[in-house]
Image: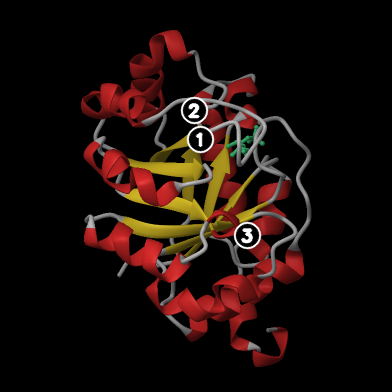
Amino acid sequence: MTNSHDVKIIPSVLPADFSRLGQECTDLESAGVDAIQFDVMDGQFVPNLTFGADTIASVRDKVSVEFEAHLMIETPDQFIQNFVDAGCQTLIVHAEACAHLHRTIHKIKEAGAKAGVALNPHTPIEMVENVAVDLDMLLVMTVNPGFGGQKYIELGPKLDKARALSNATSNFEIEVDGGINAETIKHAAAHGANMFISGSTLYKHPEGLAACVKELREAAEASIDLTHGTDPSCC
Ligand code: DX5
């Protein structure tokens, strides 16, 4: 069981130069990231289109860090094996796209990957209450999915409930994605998140990737508070 108290700084490659994606991944690993997240978009579930499993497979052997596939797609069940075969250790599906979420989570685990579920900002934590025991991680979106560079949406009470649910069930990790910078990461960490996705902040940092990873990690570690989950009244 992964300790859901470890701070993890994970880049989204959405802002990367796709013409040199392999080198971009190597640079990220050298900068000290804990994993790399690939934002897979189908133009249906979200109003944007990115890449599929083959693109991820093409860079798998460039680095040794774990890969997460954030599947912002309408039919994730259809592609579970493709993304596992491409070398992803974690698959993250959107609860809003899964009519049979319990079955989807088990299909991911049977394929040998860790199972993550993502919730759009409007979707309540209750959506995953009945599958929490099977979760390896929960992604609380802090922007509406589809694009990088958006403003962080403060979801403190929702994160508190997620942490309480984690502490009461499988101790699943809690990830936030969208608008994460040196300030907003403090808010998310203080409300129980331990995994942090960053795209634009990482790629725009004036001192480069490694300095940004260090700054984000220090800010999260100084602010993280996993005690919210001990108060049963919070969920
Ligand atoms: C939205 C994407 C973004 C991206 C991070 O669908 O998932 O959240 O990964 O973007 P930034 O860090 O630029 O907000």
Task: Work out whether 167 lies above or below 111.
Answer: below
**Could you tell me residue 51's position as x and y percent?**
45, 25
Q: Residues within 10 Å of mark 3 (few under 14, many from 20)?
A: many
Q: CA separation, marks 2 and 1?
A: 7 Å
Specify the color scheme. secondary structure
Q: Nearer the viewer, mark 2 or mark 1?
A: 1
Q: Please give the residue where the numbered disc 3 appears in the rendered image.
A: 189
Q: Quadrant of ligand 1?
A: top right
Front-most of residues 143 and 62: 143
Q: In the current view of this chain or complex, which residue is farthest to the bottom? A: 232
Residue type at mark 3? Ala
The answer to which of 15 and 224 lies nearer the viewer is 15
Residue 39: mark: 1
- Mark toward the start of the polypeptide (2 vs 1): 2
Left/right placement of residue 23 relative to residue 43 reads: left
Q: Are marks 2 and 1 in contact (CB under 8 Å)?
A: yes
Query: Mark 1 vs ligand 1: CB under 8 Å?
Result: yes
Dot 2 amino acid type: Val
Relative placement, left or right, of 111 versus 218 is: left
Q: Image quarter for residue 69?
A: top left
* x and y, in percent, of residue 92 in the image: 45, 51
Disc on res. 13: 2
Nearest to N terminus: mark 2 or mark 3: 2
Q: Which residue is rendered at x = 48% and y = 53% of the image?
A: 93
